[in-house]
Image (spheres, rainbow, N blue to C red):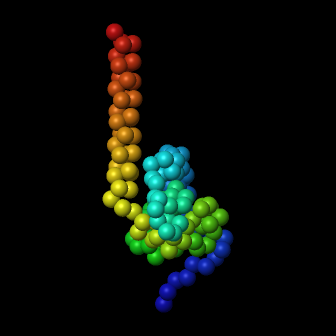
Amino acid sequence: MAAVFDEPNLIADAGLVPVVRLAERAGLPGLTEDALRITGVGNSAGANPSAKVMSLVAAMCAGADSIDDADLLRHGAMPVAFAGVRAPSTLGTFLRSFTHGHGLQLHADRHAGAEGRRAQHQGHERTNQGARD
């Protein structure tokens, strides 16, 4: 016996809506576009990386633990709630195109962001300390 979810007007994982909106408000798509460059591949792996990253994040939050499981984002009314959902084969091509250099790009961007937040925090502390003196 197997359960089938084939109602086109329902969303099985409605909890993804606030998670995806939070990632969008936090700027994840923009950070991906700014930090990640996939060039020199003979396919479209480097096209629109932000949509692919958002699809992967949403799939993982919904419990996907393999590329094939990412297909759960394309059932029911999920495409209505989430624009830009990519097919599992597209996500697999995207992930297979990553090299060590791409990991370094993402690490450098994450590190630069942490340094910027630390400097901003220290500046805020100095401003508050000067106001108390």
In the current view of this chain or complex, which residue is farthest to the bottom?
Answer: 1
The residue that appears at 34% across and 52% down in the rendered structure is: 104
The residue that appears at 34% across and 36% down in the rendered structure is: 115
Report whether residue 79 is seen. Answer: yes
Apparent side of residue 62 relative to residue 129 in the rendered image (left or right): right
Of residues 85 and 36, the one nearer the viewer is: 36
The residue that appears at 46% across and 54% down in the rendered structure is: 37
Of residues 120 and 62, the one nearer the viewer is: 120
The residue that appears at 51% across and 69% down in the rendered structure is: 43
Up the image or down, 92 lies above or below 35; here it is below
In the current view of this chain or complex, which residue is farthest to the top?
Answer: 133
Q: Position of residue 34 (x, y in %)?
A: 49, 47
Q: Position of residue 71 (x, y in %)?
A: 52, 74
Report whether residue 62 is seen. Answer: no
Q: How many numbered markers are drawn?
A: 0
Q: Position of residue 70 (x, y in %)?
A: 48, 71
> Residue 7's quadrant in the figure?
bottom right
Q: Position of residue 122 (x, y in %)?
A: 34, 26
Q: Quadrant of the C terminus?
A: top left
Apparent side of residue 111 relative to residue 70 in the rendered image (left or right): left
Of residues 98 and 74, the one nearer the viewer is: 98
Of residues 124 and 106, the one nearer the viewer is: 106
